[in-house]
Image (cartoon, grey):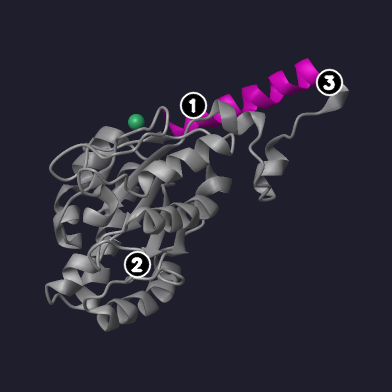
């Protein structure tokens, strides 16, 4: 759905709201603009396309739910709507284990992929699925494989540019990546560059918002192999994403 259509829908919603409820009011556009996190009737009418982008941490292996599952649960439990989008529908080597009713399986999590590999495909995905919101958790494989922090950030920047070429007002939620028992020092150094990078890439129409998945994540107790989240890790990630995106849904 185009931004124009969405804006039209929003205006229609506000008008409908005024007609139907009159003096009782119904939480209009102002509530959204002021950062109110309670979903409004308008938000319920406009379903945002959310593309989770990343590597194995986003995809999750067969038999694991992925953070996308508890995130979906939080979105629905909070009264919000969303359409997860992407070319992928499952986990690595099989389906994810999510049992949440109506779980939207679409995503762009690719097992083992680096930022440069995502970069090579992002234009096609963006053109096909046209996300309003992207969740980017990338860099872990790049750093594990000895790529530099500079080159990794440059590639993430190019990914954002390509997303904007399709949707100039895409909202980018960029993770400080989760902790790992492997190369944690390098990941920490990468994460420390994320806030300044996000500020440098951020625009009024297409903000880049940092989502801290690092702080409070315990690689020993929140993963099953030192790298990939277990259920508690997935829940922690979902909560961070949800708190970051809920006012944009
Ligand atoms: Ca979907």
Mark 1 secondary-structure assignment? helix
Q: Mark yes or no: residue 55 visible.
A: no
Q: Which residue is at the front of the view, 40 or 90?
A: 90
**Mark 2 vs ligand 1: CB under 8 Å?**
no
Q: Which residue is at the front of the view, 185 or 126?
A: 185
Q: Is residue 129 above or below residue 162?
A: above
Q: Mark yes or no: residue 64 visible.
A: yes
The image position of residue 35, as x and y in percent, is 66, 50
Total count of labels: 3
Separation (CA) of disc 2 from disc 3? 48 Å
Prevailing SS of the magenta stretch: helix
In the picture of the structure, the residue carrying the numbered disc 1 is 5
Instruction: Residue 42: give its label.
Output: none
Q: Is residue 184 magenta?
A: no
Residue plotted at (36% across, 32% down): 104
* Residue range of the region highlighted in magenta in the rendering: 1-22
Q: Is residue 18 magenta?
A: yes
Q: Quadrant of ligand 1?
A: top left
Residue plotted at (20% across, 48% down): 61
Q: Which residue is at the front of the view, 170 or 139?
A: 139
Pointer 3 or 1: first along the chain: 1
Residue plotted at (64% across, 24% down): 13
Residue 78 lies in what quarter of the image?
top right
Mark 2 secondary-structure assignment? loop
- Cβ atoms at labels 3 and 1 below 8 Å apart: no
Q: Which residue is at the front of the view, 92 or 128?
A: 92
Instruction: Residue 22: give its label.
Output: 3
Separation (CA) of disc 1 from disc 2? 37 Å
- Cβ atoms at labels 2 and 3 below 8 Å apart: no
In the picture of the structure, the residue carrying the numbered disc 2 is 178
Q: Is residue 164 above or below residue 73?
A: below
Separation (CA) of disc 3 from disc 1? 25 Å
């Amino acid at each position: 759905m185009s931004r124009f259509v969405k804006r039209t829908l929003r205006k229609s919603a506000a008008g409908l709201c005024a007609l139907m409820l009159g003096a009782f009011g119904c939480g209009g556009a102002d509530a959204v603009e002021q950062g109110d996190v309670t979903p409004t009737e308008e938000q319920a009418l406009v379903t945002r396309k959310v593309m989770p982008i990343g590597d194995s941490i986003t995809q999750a292996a067969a038999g694991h739910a992925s953070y996308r599952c508890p995130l979906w649960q939080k979105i629905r439990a909070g009264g919000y709507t969303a359409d997860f989008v992407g070319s992928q529908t499952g986990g690595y080597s099989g389906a994810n284990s999510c049992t949440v009713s109506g779980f939207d399986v679409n995503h762009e999590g690719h097992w083992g992929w680096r930022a440069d590999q995502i970069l090579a495909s992002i234009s096609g995905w963006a053109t096909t699925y046209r996300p309003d919101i992207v969740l980017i958790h990338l860099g872990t494989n790049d750093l594990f494989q000895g790529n530099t922090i500079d080159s990794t950030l440059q590639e993430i920047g190019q990914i954002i540019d390509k997303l904007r070429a399709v949707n100039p007002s895409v909202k980018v939620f960029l993770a400080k990546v989760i902790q790992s028992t492997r190369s944690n020092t390098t990941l920490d150094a990468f994460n420390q560059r994320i806030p300044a990078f996000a500020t440098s890439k951020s625009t009024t129409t297409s903000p880049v918002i940092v989502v801290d998945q690092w702080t409070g994540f315990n690689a020993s107790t929140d993963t099953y192999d030192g790298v990939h989240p277990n259920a508690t890790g997935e829940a922690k990630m979902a909560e961070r994403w949800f708190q970051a995106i809920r006012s944009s849904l």
